[in-house]
Amino acid sequence: MDHAATTPLDIDAFNAMKPFLLNDFGNASQQYSFARTAKAALKAARVTIAKCINAEPEEIYFTSGGTESDNWAIKSTAFAFGNHRAIITSQIEHHAILRSCHAVERMGIPVFYLPVDSSGVVQPDILSEYIDDSTKMVSIMYANNEIGTIQPIKKLCEITHSKGALFHTDAVQAVGHIPIDVKELDIDMLSASAHKFNGPKGIGFLYIKKGTQIAPYADGGAQEFGMRAGTENIASIVAMAVALEKNCNRMKSVSDHLIGLEKLMTSLLKKAELDFIKNGSPKKIPGNISLSFKNAEGEMLLHRLDLMGISVSTGSACDSKNTQISHVLEAVHVSENYAKGTIRISLGYENTEEEIFYIVQSLMKILKR
Ligand code: PLP
């Protein structure tokens, strides 16, 4: 029950990888016929992935995952073409964004971290307040990994463009789970990661709109249109395309299933009269359920549930003296007596109603001592 952390590899994606690990292991950069299968597969995967987000194939740049895509977007934009204009992001970004921003700040580039409202939404008015002609880029995540909140991306992107800045979104939790159309939204850059949508780990992509001024991430060979050098991981790229296409095709039915499971869980928890609040906004990633139980300890809940065979994550971490609340829960101002008892349950298509009954019973056993 921790699909926001990672998802199982889809069997068709796994089967699609195998020939490129065993027989068709040619280097896609080579000219001879043996490398042609790999080259053709690379091209086909780019076309498939582009279609899933309504991009052009040459706008998809393969990377090692969400972290690398985020680092590339922030750092290469910040340092591109030598000027030192500001970056705006939010307080609830993933550490891949936040720590990339800290790195560029150390190099003298100003970064502003926008607050969010109590449901985790970056209000467009706040962006309008902070943005000006000195802003080079705005990076706001599509959906939050801890509480699932989906941002008003189109509006935020419009405001950004009205000041001539670039708009990037970390869509690692969104791609493959909710429909995304980069043309309709007019996004300049978007990060994605395969292992969040039933693809392999260590592979992802950065969408970069044609004509966007961004520096290469890795110098070396001519791979990825000269922007990200290094021999391509063909097997994983092929598997990522299969997984993404499959997830996009079943998105509606999976989403209905997850919304149903979430409703069931919420009603069972209420019936059990457990004192909890549900974090995030009504507009959120289906199945991402952040629950804060009054006067509980998130880490204790995690370990007790683990002993019962249930994997969840927590929004707080204990050391010997204190409980540290995550930056996201702090930003949405969950009161301390609830925040400390936060767990994130993130459901996937293979979770069942029986499992929902089991987790609620398990929570009751732990919390109703
Ligand atoms: N961004 C978000 C919102 C995430 O949830 C994650 C992973 O949890 C990442 C970035 C990092 O992605 P990866 O694990 O592919 O490096």
Image (tube, rainbow, N blue to C red):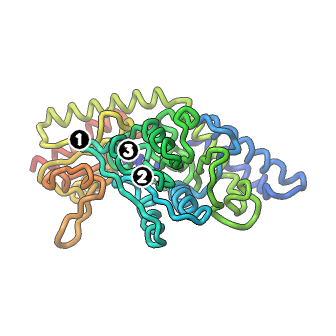
Q: Which element carries disc 3, helix, strand or loop?
A: helix
Q: Is mark 2 within 8 Å of ligand 1?
A: yes
Q: Quadrant of residue 89?
A: bottom left
Measured from the top left, where is residue 369 in percent x and y?
A: 9, 50
Asked whether the beta carbons under mark 3 and mark 2 sit within 8 Å of each other, the answer is no
Find residue 5 and name its label: 2
Amino acid at dot 1: Lys
Residue 23 located left or right of residue 309: right
Q: Is mark 3 within 8 Å of ligand 1?
A: no
Asked whether the beta carbons under mark 1 and mark 3 sit within 8 Å of each other, the answer is no
In three-dimensional space, the C-alpha distance between marks 2 and 1, rounded to whole angstroms, equals 19 Å
Label 3, residues with CA under 10 Å away: few <14, some 14-19, many ≥20:
some
2 or 1: tag closer to the N-terminus:
2
For disc 1, the marked residue is 278
Measured from the top left, where is residue 11 in percent x and y?
A: 58, 42
For disc 3, the marked residue is 128
Find residue 289 and name its label: none
3 or 2: tag closer to the N-terminus:
2
Residue 31 located left or right of residue 363: right
